[in-house]
Amino acid sequence: MTTETAGDTGEATGTTGITGTAGAADTAGTARATGTAGTVPGVPAAGAAVPLAAPVIAASAVTVAPPGTPGPARTTGTAGRAALALDAACEHLLGLQSPEGWWKGELQTNVTMDAEDLLLREFLGIRTEEDTAAAARWIRSEQRGDGTWATFHGGPGDLSTTVEAYTALRLAGDPPDAAHMRAAAGFVRDSGGVEAARVFTRIWLALFGRWPWERLPALPPEMIFLPPWFPLNVYDWACWARQTVVPLTVVAAHRPVRPLPFGLAELRTGRDPGGRPRPGWEAAFTALDRVLRRYERHPVPGLRRAALRRAAEWIVARQEADGSWGGIQPPWVYSLMALHLQGYHLDHPVMRRGVRGLDRFTIREAGTRRLEACQSPVWDTVLAVNGLLDAGLPGDHPALLRAAGWVLGEEIRGPGDWSVRRPDLPPGGWAFEFDNDGYPDIDDTAEVILALRRVRHPGARPAVDRAVRWMTGMASRDGGYGAFDADNTRVLCTKLPFCDFGEVIDPPSADVTAHVAEALAHEAPGSLALRRAVVWLLRAQEADGSWFGRWGVNHVYGTGAVVPALVAAGVRPDGPWIRRAVAWLERHQNADGGWGEDLRSYTDPSWIGRGASTPSQTAWALLALLAAGERSPAVDRGVTWLADHQRPDGTWDEPYFTGTGFPGDFSINYHLYRLVFPVSALGRYLRRERRADAGAGPSPDGARRERRTGAGGGSSPDGVGRHRRAGGGEDRS
């Protein structure tokens, strides 16, 4: 979700240069744009946060009385309440900035992080009673009344999560006949037992002798030798998957067993987890797995030793400065185990950094201990900067300059795994985390561009130019953008028997492509890359008018990202794509005025656009409606919902998870989403109201204004126009 100024009143500030029928495709499936060639732990303490000498958006700045009314401006009605809410929200957000300039909210996931951390420590022989007791308290606190654990707030009980949580509590000493343990075990058996758990859960059990290695899919480490052009080489996997699979091949080759002091018979059903594979890819890969299993019994000794050595070197080369791998939990824990099995002792510098680095991801409070699966300081910081700019802070505000300075210091200027597919592309992006230099991502880079271009920092322009070059070069063949790699689309990876743990490839998505398109609309208007991205987005619209959300939940997120991007790129707000999106959002507004979408929408279409109202999802819907130029009851009701549900301290409560790791499998509650996106939405709403009050905004009947300059300013029959800002200057209002 972007927070750039463009499109907040329906004005188009960039140009796609697309004319005629959008989205014509050639025989290779590549989108082709037509037109003239010439247009081608926890939230940080306040620290040194800058206090506000005056309200960010003074309530008196929004007049709801008719122009010319004598006396002081009145602050009644929706606009007045929005101004007060925005002022409190900005105060709260500024107070969360670190002295170094960054923001970071907790990245909340589920208890598998804590269960697997205890199991990792047991495997390495470093588990302590203190850590175990604190983690167990947290795991117990997350158990639901029916004895299960879910992967997101309000979701259904999850079999694999419950198995792992139960095993961790047994490790902590909880007796199997305790009421909460009996309830959990009953759910596991009723759901098919450990036999039906995901492969990764059964790998954890195999490490401790509670599942036979022979009944797991084969993972030969020799795959590390496959060249990048060969199917199923490690670079065919998404970056998060390849960093997990490579160490897993080492672990699986060793087949370690470090028995637990208890059994788990109470979690078994005795049923065979297998079954006849379906004809097609499933049958083919099942047959391949049988062949690989036979090889696993008698591998070529020299080749196996070389593969294990090469895999270990690959792993070590990708450790980050903070000791992590990829800044995320799964590759981190498996890499530590893999290297340990390869003979790296716990006092080896690589192992010391890896184990010590976990402390940075650990949150301790009220006698509990929990781990973040990842941390998001770059993402949170640029969202906060964009939100505060939308709220009216000047680009030279000290808090924004401090944030920009920190962000500039995080620029990645070296190669990474992305270079395998783009070897000649100069670097220049940003990662999501504090330390993940091998894996800058396109989504963060687009948001950084949108933030830095509006902050008056003297060092911003060269970094923005490098980022635009790198980001543009990461386009996939079809004109869209994935998160970390270009053309990471080989679906063969998804067919392997052990790929039941979520997304394993990184194809282009609507939300990432939208963020890139919005950044390009300001930094490279008229470029071929922008035109192709717009065509990709237009073709990706769902039949109901929405867009799928890959990294946020779900169609509300996707639609909230795409509509502002398309308008910024020059797609007419009264064109069919935007009108369908607006209609979809209005149909899915809740009776209370907010918007929400449940994570089950990824697996059950009946949940699409349905769910309890949340601050972040309400803000996403408002950002889209405001970009489309809507002056409707839906907008006022959404703004009122935000004002009504704000806490006294200026933020909002949001227990529901609105972030996505793997659709349908791994979900995230970003604790700053509940604050930064409402700040953007309220700021844009109030800016629109000020313009309308000054007589420059959309007319009361909802007609959209379109400034056109020069020849050819008209629109094509398909509703995609070539719009330019009059005068060509940047709008900082």
Image: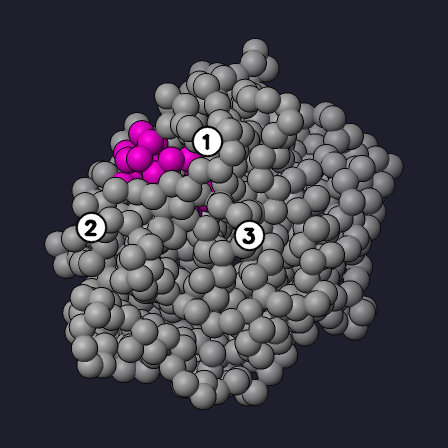
Q: Residues within 10 Å of mark 2 (few under 14, many from 20)?
A: few
Identify the residue position indicated by label 3 in the image. Answer: 729
Q: Main secondary structure of the magenta part?
A: helix
- Where is residue 150 drawn, in percent x and y? 33, 57
Q: Residue at x 25, y 42 (%)?
A: 703
What range of the chain is rendered magenta? 560-582
Identify the residue under disc 2: 700
Amino acid residing under circle 3: Gly
The residue singled out by tag 1 in the image is: 713
- At mark 3, the secondary structure is loop
Using residue 683 as the reference point, say whether residue 302 is left or right of it: right
**Element on which disc 2 rests:** loop
Q: Nearer the viewer, residue 316 or 644?
A: 644
Q: Quadrant of the C terminus?
A: bottom left
User: Would you say 333 lies left or right of 423 here?
Assistant: left
Q: How is the image coloured?
A: one colour
Relative to the observer, which residue lies in front, 119 or 594?
A: 594
Question: Which residue lies at the image location 77% right of the left edge and 55% below the top edge?
Answer: 413
**In 3D space, how far apart are the residues under numbered discs 1 and 2 (Cα atoms)?**
25 Å
Pinpoint residue 714: horizontal percent, then vertical percent.
42, 28
Mark 2: which amino acid? Pro
**Would you identify the image quadrant in which residue 21 lies?**
top left
User: Pointer 3: residues within 10 angstroms few (<14), some, or many (20+)?
Assistant: few
Q: Is residue 257 above or below residue 646?
A: above
